[in-house]
Amino acid sequence: MTLNTSNFAGQMTKKDLRIVFFGTPDFAVASLKAIVEAGYQVVAVVTAPDKAAGRGYQLQSSAVKKAALELGLDVLQPEKLKSPEFIETLKSYQADLQIVIAFRMLPEIVWNMPAMGTFNLHASLLPAYRGAAPINHAIINGETETGNTTFFLKHEIDTGAIILQDKVSIRPEDNAGTLHDKLMLNGAELVVKSLDAIISGNCQLSEQQHGEFPTAPKIFTETCQINWHQTAIQVHNLIRGLSPYPAAFTEFMGKKLKIYGSSTTNEAASQPGLIEVLGKDRLIAHCGDFILNITDVQYEGKKRMPVRDFLNGLKTT
């Protein structure tokens, strides 16, 4: 099914279109800057309230707030998205369109407010990897390709009509951090292309396919604990998919060991879960089929370091 949005836009120009932007982390910053640099009018930015962080528990602003203030934009930081005060303030900006990137779930009274609706940037090729952690799960599942999707919000999460999609390759050396950065930049371009399509009056919306697709649920602590009975490539992909944050982990010598990097081998494993030190610079783990080299770690109470430095530290303790 294909829908046409020409009745929304007509001859509207970039400066005519009033946009409210919702976002919080770094991933959303690139898109916010790209929208402004492309000449679009962002009348307000909605982001998370400042939070106490660090040793001194000083209030820290979100990455989006910092970027918005640098751009001279109005910033709203509601505690509750359904509060009457926030709803009235949001209405006062008379937005034609809202854009949501890496923000919490919006109530219908918010996403349904603008005449042209609200669209979201999601870091997957929907309908695959609906959910909170699409970047992580794509790598964990061993995918070699993912991408970004812009789509209009509706009641069911990540199910709305698609505006545009763009594919991004996942290289063998990619982890969640490097793929995040590639998708962040690609997504910023896709958001601007989506806006251009909408105001041109020629935007064609495609309904999402139905069927069984991989999902991307939130990452919990149990997700990060390594099951060494899995194959070496499965464990390797888990490590990649959780690096640099929140990081896969195991227990080694009675302490928690976070693992940020690994490499596969064709050496047969003997006892799944056995972790051995070989020589001065090799730490290996036995998986369900083959041995995995561990290359980058953080021991409980220590800093992250290459495995050679980690092994040198073990000898001095």
Image: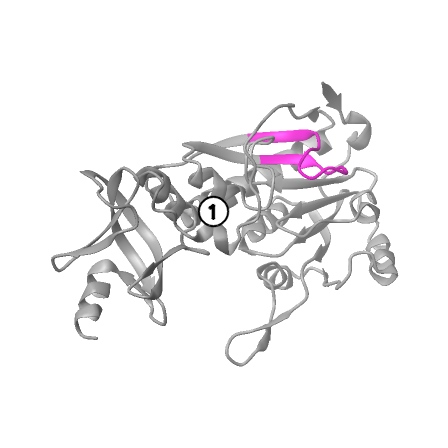
Report the residue at 84% width, 49% height from top: 94
Please give left or right for residue 256 compared with residue 98 in the image. Answer: left
Reply yes or no: does residue 314 show up in magenta. Answer: no
Rendering colour mode: one colour
Point out the stretch of residues depicted in magenta. Answer: 149-165
* Res. 46 image quadrant: bottom right
Residue carrying label 1? 180
Q: Nearer the viewer, residue 39 or 163?
A: 163
Q: Nearer the viewer, residue 80 or 39?
A: 80
Mark 1 secondary-structure assignment: helix
Which quadrant is home to the C terminus? bottom left
Q: How many marks?
A: 1
Q: Position of residue 199 (x, y in %)?
A: 72, 33
Q: Work out which residue is located at the far bottom of the displayed protein and give it.
A: 56
Q: Position of residue 29 (x, y in %)?
A: 57, 53
Asked if residue 185 shows in the view, the reply is: no
Report the residue at 75% width, 64% height from top: 79
Q: Position of residue 285 (x, y in %)?
A: 26, 49
**From what the image shows, is residue 96 above or below residue 224?**
above
Q: Position of residue 313 (x, y in %)?
A: 21, 70
Reply yes or no: does residue 154 show up in magenta. Answer: yes
Please give left or right for residue 198 compared with residue 102 in the image. Answer: right
